[in-house]
Amino acid sequence: MTDTATTERPTGLSGLLSRITTGSNAGSLRTSLTTVASSLAAVAIALSICAVLLLVTGKSPVDAYSTILETAGDSNKLLEMLRRSTPLIFSATAVAVGFKMNLFNIGVEGQYLFAALIAAEAGSRVSLPAVAHIVFILLVAMAAGALWASISGILKVYRNIHEVISTIMLNYIALSVIQWLFENFFRDDTVEGLNVKTTIIAESGQMPDLVDGRLNAMFLVALATAGAFWVLVYRSRFGFRLRASGYNPNAAEVAGIGARRMIIAAMLISGAIAGLVAMYSVIGETYAYGPSATPTQFGFAGITVALLGRNHPIGIVIAALLFGFLDSTSAVLQLADVPNSIVKVMQSIIVLAVVVVNEATIRRLNARTAEQMRAQTDSGEAS
Amino acid sequence: MTTSTPPAVALDGIWKRFPGVIANHDVTLSVDRGTIHAIVGENGAGKSTLMKTLYGMHRPDAGTVAVNGTDMHMKSPADAIAAGIGMVHQHFMLADNFSVLENIILGSEPAHRGVIDAASARTDLTELMRTVGVTLDLDTPVSELGVGERQRVEILKVLYRGADIVILDEPTAVLVPEEVDELFATLRRLVNDGTTVIFISHKLDEVLQVSDAITVMRQGTTVASVAPADIDRAGLAELMVGSELPTPGGRTTDIGETERLTVANLSVVGADGRLVVEDATFAVRAGEIVGIAGVEGNGQYELCTAIIGLRPATGTVIVDGDDISTASVRDRHDAGVAYIPFDRHREALMLNSSLWENGLLGREASPELSTGPLVNIGAARSSTRDIIDRFGVLTPNETVPAFALSGGNQQKLVVGRSMITEPAVLIAAHPTRGIDVGAQAAVWAELRDARDAGCAILLVSADLDELIGLSDTLLVMFDGRIAAEVDPDDVSPAILGGYMTGATTGAAS
């Protein structure tokens, strides 16, 4: 009798996943503060665990953490943090769009690399005035990312293939397709040696630097994208339908929100944002796509940043900055004789701690709300 | 001697309350050792809750449970199993890729120094099957078995664990007639060996055929205990649906002349290729409530979801003269069709979302609640405040999450959301299910007001009092067909029960 328990919620793994991904959206100030506090607590817990790990391996956690702290005062390191956070903001936003309706886009990696190659090649073949050239390349990147992501959306809608499977598999396919396209069609044969690339994009298509050689304007595009994500998801009718489909697909269908259309739309948007992940490099640093020059692994890092940021744009930006900062310290740590892999360990432990702490927080918050409501309304209710 | 034997199961004064609803109250049940005892009642009458109490899946708020004369305080199914109670669930819980033997011993494996002693299990099971009169190949994977055989595996599993009281929850729901006969033969042999069987059902023929005693439940409580020899099918149906006929209706306005909802030759094909709705034809006029009675699962759900466009169907649906037979859910909604779903948690609410977001669902495209492509949050919140005020939803404000509301208040919100748009046609499916008396009266009042304002209402309900009281015309659905049209002013629950269970046929308009 499902109609007897008012606080019935999905349980088990799928319930946990849906709570991680969609979260509780009953937003009061108190709830938000509790969520922020729990995230901070999670980071503190993670730092403590890492300290123990460092001690066990015979390193001094005090040295390691003071080295990390010292970098925070270095303006060049802070610029490096912003630079490294740029692809993470795109990647996490792309993942979060899917998460908002319980779609797991694990394929950001393949989508952004595919988009990087296509956009770099397209950008090198056209000549346009300065701003238009950049916009053109970004649009091509978004279209290419969306195209690659749409395969998974179509497979899910028409063949009922779970997007986790198809996006993971399409990552591998993307790598092969990229390699084939690059070697056979797009490679600039005038370049010798190991550092092969596509043809260099003309200056009109190069993203200007904000700080010379340190940070380019893709960082601003990333912030704008996070802002657009907020408007789209939390303020637009489309975003409302997206979230409704994620929270309760059956109720959404009854309300006339077609699940198929929403799945395709979510995958297209997710893929389009994914297409921008490597652009800070492709049009801001190397001005070309190159198998060794274009950065990899940001697709997977985006999943953890999205989780840490609770799929909220502000959370994502903060989480990306934190991860970018930790990444930027790894070179310094190396110099201080601390294995820089501790940074990756720390990032992973932070995410795990956040997931665990948040689950506990949400349960307590929900129990408290239900309790308050019962106390307030019981007196007025015939029973 | 038998007179001094305590009953195998005795429940006395059981209460079980869930937030917002009383699932069981004053339940009293006495099951004699070595008998088949049937518990009958409509869906929602509290049978499942009672069985969960008996099987230790939750603890009653009040009352006593005694097994073989001993008071029990069961905290979990493990306690129930230890007391010799076994349960065969309606949905089987078997591991498909395990063999029959492995499934039966799963969880109570006989072991010798940590190694499963399959040989002794096989000997025990062969003996058990001989006693019970069941034949199964113990090495066949369960995935290769039919439904009836799987059920036998479940029964054997329960017996293997030493149960002498076996509860079967709607065991015949999944079986074809021959399998039902086999099951009954097995049950008969079981009780001859001294096992006690508690059999939950709402199929009256089967109950009368197989049981030694019958307890009837209605609206959360046990209303009668009878011997099958002393009652006939119609009598049982009357007990099941209740004979009191209060009138939640009473109308002051006249039914209009215009047909606002016309359904013609509507048929729906189910998942198994069978027609689950067959050739339904009826009309609802302005200011009219047409009720649909029927035992759950006879096509009511499919009929409603076909009318709102959620399910493919053949035939014609016309609303206010517009043919919407092929329109989408949204277009039908825009044409004036509103729907109060069967199951508010599944089909109506986003439990973790705020009330105003729930109030907005389905109306997010309406011009008053949006600004271009954006949601007008202020308007959406104030619209939900209107629903809260008008429909008496008990809540501090519109920002609390829906899960925090009691069932009755959730339902008032759902009903309010459907009615605040003043729809031409309202499909109300179990609008008062699982909510308390006060909320029920409020929902009834709203339905009457909408009707008086000219809305055409199709009311599906399991509550016959509600149907008879509110409806102007009453249709009975049985096996996907509209089996009868009756005048609610001139019908008794007994007559209605006869149509609903297929005992009486004909008189269809």
Image (cartoon, rainbow, N blue to C red):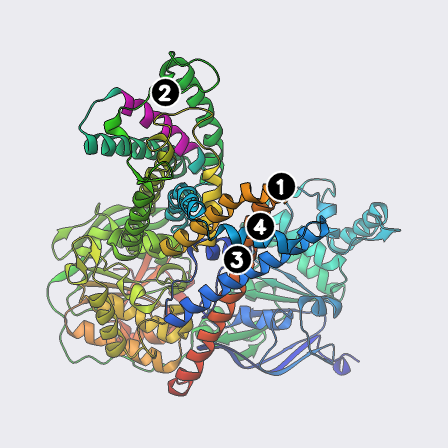
Cα gap from disc 4 to disc 2, whole angstroms: 36 Å
Residue B55 x/y as whole percent? 64, 69
Chain that bears disc 1: B
Q: Which residue is mark 1?
A: B143
The foreground one among B333 and A131 is A131
Q: What's the chain of the residue with tag 2?
A: A
Checking the image for residue B103, the label placed there is none
> Which type of secondary structure does the marked residue at label 3 adopt?
helix
* Residue range highlighted in magenta: A110-124
Which x, y percent locates residue B509? 25, 60
Tell me the residue that label 2 is attached to: A198
Secondary structure beneath label 1? helix
Residue at 30% in and 43% down: A221
Q: CB of mark 3 within 8 Å of CB of mark 2? A: no
Disc 3 or disc 2, which is closer to the eye?
Answer: 2
Q: Which mark identifies residue A354? A: 3
Q: Of the residues shown, which amino acid type is indicated by label 3?
A: Val
Which residue is identified by label 4? A346
Mark nearer the viewer, 1 or 2? 2
- Image position of A52 with respect to A129: above or below: below
Q: Closer to us: mark 3 or mark 4?
A: 4
Q: Do we see residue B203 in this rendering?
A: no
* Outermost residue, right side: B113
Q: Quadrant of residue B237?
A: bottom left
Quadrant in which the C terminus of chain A appears: bottom left
Asked if badges 3 and 4 are on one and the same chain, I answer yes
| Marks 1 and 3 on same chain | no
User: Dividing the picture into quarters, in which one does residue B12 lie?
Assistant: bottom right
* Disc 1/disc 3 C-alpha distance (Å): 41 Å
- Tag nearer the camera, 1 or 3: 3
**How many C-alpha atoms fall within 10 Å of the one at disc 2: few (<14), some, or many (≥20)?**
many
Say what amino acid the circle numbered 4 marks: Met
